Image (cartoon, rainbow, N blue to C red):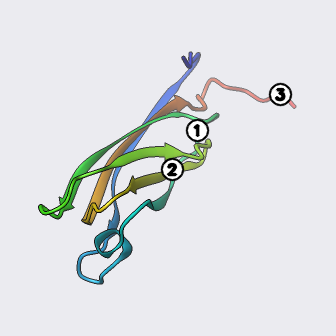
Amino acid sequence: MKKFTGSIGITQGNDVIFEHFQDGGEMWTGSGNREMRKPITFREAFNASPSVHCSLTLWDVDSDTNVRADIEAENITAAGFDLVFRTWGDTKIARIRAGWMAIGPVRSEDDWELY
């Protein structure tokens, strides 16, 4: 559990990770283990690595194959993180959009630096 003292900031976004249907990309035409990453940079950095929650907000998938999906935030720093989507097997995915929210400590106008 992360415990915060002082000011807490929240930022969020909704980003397309990939669109592979029209251009025959690997998520639509491939099979086996596949992964796509989208680097996310916060507009304003936190004081330390925040807690990040992500979820699917759009998935466009083939109806003839099994749907397999894993989404998570990796490499979380005070400045940003990698939004990561994975699938496997025969799953065919045309496009994915993910929402995310980061919550963590931020500087306050009451924070001072003496030296």
Q: Please state, as top left, top right, bottom left or bottom right, where the N terminus lies in the image.
A: top right
Whichever of callouts 1 and 3 sits on the residue coming sooner in the sequence is 1
Classify 10 Å Cα crowding around label 2: few (below 14), some (14-19), many (20 and above): some
Between discs 2 and 3, the one toward the N terminus: 2
Secondary structure type for disc 3: loop
Secondary structure under the numbered disc 1 in the rendered image: loop
Horizontal side, residue 4 vs residue 61: left or right? right
Residue ID for mark 2: 42
Q: Residue at x 58, y 43 (%)?
A: 76
For image coordinates 32% across by 51% down, the residue present is 98
Marks 2 and 1 in Cβ contact (< 8 Å) = yes
* Relative side of 114 to 70, left or right: right
Residue 94 image-quadrant placement: bottom left
- Residue type at mark 3 is Leu
The residue to which callout 3 is attached is: 114
Front disc: 1 or 3: 1
Residue at numbered disc 1: 46
